[in-house]
Amino acid sequence: MFQTFKLQIMKNSILRFGGYGALIGGSIFAGSHFFTNLIDFSLLEIFGYLSIFASLSFVFFGIKHFRDKTNGGIVSFGKALVIGLAISAIVGIVIGLLDIVYVTLINPDFSAEYIQYTLNDLKETLPPAEFEIQKEKLITDMEAFDNPTFAGLFMFGIVFTIGIIITVISSFILQRKK
């Protein structure tokens, strides 16, 4: 019975801080895409990573809250890891779903626009022979992104991978035994 209660408290912390992270990350992600016609892709990429790091900061705060407010100042590395990974998964799923919505409904031409933007940049910096090689590589690499599910899974993978790193660091910093 006591163990079930502790799991419920842990679940509440995960959902609470995962929700906060998803809300912040989703807001920055969605907000930046309203300005896509005003800003270039390099600035949009910065906003993307800003949304990932801002939302994943809740991994640290979620573990700390669980340790300090609900678990009597104690959290093992393993429990901190579970909490952090679960928060990262929630954030990753939300941002991945938002990416699917973006490339499907809001800007179905995103892939073509990104290719054109990148090719214009490459054309200015590479010699013609190298440009042709990089052009073919870029077009081949971007074919997978025409599938919205792949794009969403790719975005989830990026967010979750960064979340793993933040979780491990946070778990080491915040672990506290009896």
Image (spheres, helix red, strand yellow):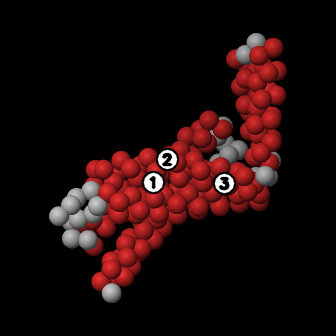
- Looking at the rendered image, the disc whose residue lies closer to the viewer, 3 or 1, is 3
Query: Is there CB contact under 8 Å for labels 1 and 2?
Result: yes
For the point 73% across and 16% down, which residue is it? 126
Where is mark 2, residue-wise? 162
Residue 125 location (% of width, % of height): 70, 17
Q: Which residue is mark 1?
A: 56
Q: Secondary structure at mark 2?
A: helix
The local crowd at label 2, few if under 14, some if 14 to 19, many if 20 or more residues have their Cα within 10 Å, is some
On the question of residue 30 being in view, the answer is: no
Q: Quadrant of residue 73?
A: bottom left
Q: For the residues marked 3 and 1, what is the alpha-carbon distance in whole angstroms?
A: 17 Å
Q: Is residue 2 above or below residue 159?
A: below
Q: Amino acid at mark 2?
A: Ile
Which element is circle 3 on? Answer: helix
Badge 1: how crowded within 10 Å, few (<14), some, or many (20+)? many
Q: What amino acid is labelled 3 in the image?
A: Leu
Tell me the tag on residue 153: 3
Real-space Cα separation, disc 3 to disc 2, in angstroms: 14 Å
Residue that sits furthest to the left in the current view = 178
Q: x and y percent of residue 130 in the render? A: 77, 16
Query: Residue flagged by tag 1: what amino acid is it?
Result: Leu
